[in-house]
Amino acid sequence: MIKLSGFFFVLLFSVQIAVAQDQQFVYDNKVYLPEIRTVQCYNTQKEQSLPVIALNSNELLYFSFDNLNGGSKIYSYTIEQCTSDWKPSRLSPLDYLQGMSEDRITAYKYSFGTLQQYTNYSLTLPNQQIKPKISGNYLLKVYENGNPQKPVVSQRFYVVDKQVTIGVNITASPQVNLRRTHQKVDFTISHSNPIQNPTLDLKAVVMQNGIPQTASWNKTPTFIRPGSLVYNDVNNNDFPGGNEFRKFDMRSFRYKAENVKEIIRDTINKVILFTDLNGNAAKFTNQFDENGSFFIRNSEGRDPNTDSDYARVYFTLNSAVPNTAGDAYVLGRFNNYIPNEASKLVYDAATKRFHTSIQLKQGLYDYKYVWLDKQADKTDLTVFEGSFFETENTYQVYVYYRKPGSRWEELIGFVNVNTTKR
C-alpha cells in the first residue's frame, strides 16, 4: 500500500512538472525562457526601424534572437492576426495567411571566438512558406519542438495597406502648466473612400518612440470634414517630452568608449559604466540619441550577430529615493521597456545609489531610468530624467478601420514623424 501511494505521488509530481512547463503565449513582445536574449525585429530597409511593412510589397521584416545554451534547437513559428488592441481576432489562418500556417526556423549560426557561447537564429517575413494576405496587427510566435505550449519568443509587428494619408503637427502643449514639459500631437486623416461612421469604425493610435506603453487611443474625431477627419482635442495626445536617452558604447572590449568606465575580461566580460546623475535638471541639454534603440556591433569581428560577445553591464544611478513607494528600473528597447526583476535597480543606502547589472550583447545601447509608483501602479519617466518640450522624439500614428460587416480591423494608415525633422 505504501509503495502504491508513493507511485501515485511520483506520478502526480511528474504531471505537475509537465503542467508547469506548458505556457500560453501573451499578445505582447515577450521572452519566455531565460536563455533567450537579444531579440531583434525591424524592417530591413533600416536597421532597428519599427517592425512595420507594407502589404503586398517587397518590404521584409528581419527577426533574430540568441540562445545562450548553444547547440541547435528545433524552433517553429507562426503568425496570428490580432485586433487593434492586441487581442486574438479569431480568424482562421486561411483568412489571413498565404501558404503554410507554421514553419521551422532553419537559419542559425554558432557564435565564434566568444567567451559566452550561443546560437543565433534568424528569419525574414514574408517568405515562401508564410505570407500575410490582409493588413493589421500581427503576433509572431516562436515555440520549441513544434509545440505551441512551449513558447520561446513572441513579437508584435504591423502590416499596413495604405488607404489614407496622415498629416501630423507637433507643438508644445497648449495647456499652460504643461507648456515647458509636454508635446502635443495633432493629426488629420485624409481619405478618398467614404467612411460612414468614423466614431464606430475607425480608431487611431498615437505612440511616442514606438513604445507600446505610451499608446494614446483616438476613437472620436474632433471635427469631421468632407474627405478628412481632424483629431486635435486639447486634452488628448499630450505626451511628456521626457529627456534624451542615455547611452553607452561597448562595441569593443579593448578600449573604453562612450560612458564606459572600466572593462574587465576574465571568465566573463564585465563592463562598468560611469555613474549616472539624476537628469531632472532645470535646464534642457541637447544630446544625440537613437530614441531608445540598440545596435549590435563588434569592432573586431566580421559578423556582429555571431562574433559579438556578451558582457555583464553594471548600471549605477546617483539619485535620492523618490517620496512615493516604488522601485527603479533601467529600460530601453533592448528589454521591451518592461519593468521586471531583470531590469530592477537595488538602492544602496550606504552609497546613496541605485545599481544593477544586466547581461547584454556587444553594441550601442540607449536607456532610461524610470520609477514605478506602486500605489498608482504607473511608471514615471520624469523622476530621474526630467521632461522638456524641446526633447527630440519620434511619434507614430496607426489608423485602423473595420469595414461595415467585416470580421477584422485593417491597418489602413501609418506614419512616423520626428519632432525636429518634419
Image (spheres, helix red, strand yellow):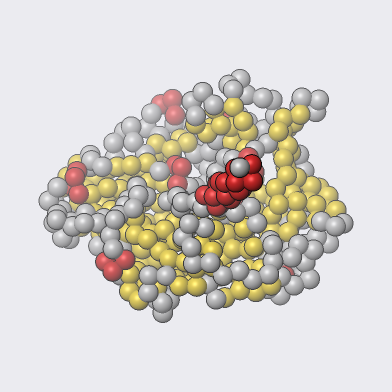
Compared to residue 335, the image places residue 124 above or below, namely: below
The residue depicted at 74 percent of the width and 65 percent of the height is 117
Q: Give 362 or 100, whichever is nearer the viewer.
A: 100
Which residue appears farthest toward the top when viewing the image? Answer: 323
On the rendered structure, is 254 left or right of 31? right
Asked if one can make out residue 286 in the rendered structure from this viewpoint, the answer is no
The residue depicted at 65 percent of the width and 74 percent of the height is 109
What x and y, as percent, mark residue 159?
36, 63
The residue depicted at 24 percent of the width and 45 percent of the height is 230
Which residue appears farthest toward the right when viewing the image? Answer: 266
The image quadrant where one finds the C terminus is bottom left
Compared to residue 48, the image places residue 169 above or below, namely: above
What x and y, as percent, mark residue 191?
20, 57
Asked if one can make out residue 274 in the rendered structure from this viewpoint, the answer is yes
Q: Give 362 or 283, whichever is nearer the viewer.
A: 362
Q: Give 303 or 341, whichever is nearer the viewer.
A: 341
What x and y, as percent, mark residue 168?
34, 50
The residue depicted at 79 percent of the width and 47 percent of the height is 272
Compared to residue 174, the image places residue 37 above or below, namely: below
On the rendered structure, is 324 left or right of 236? right
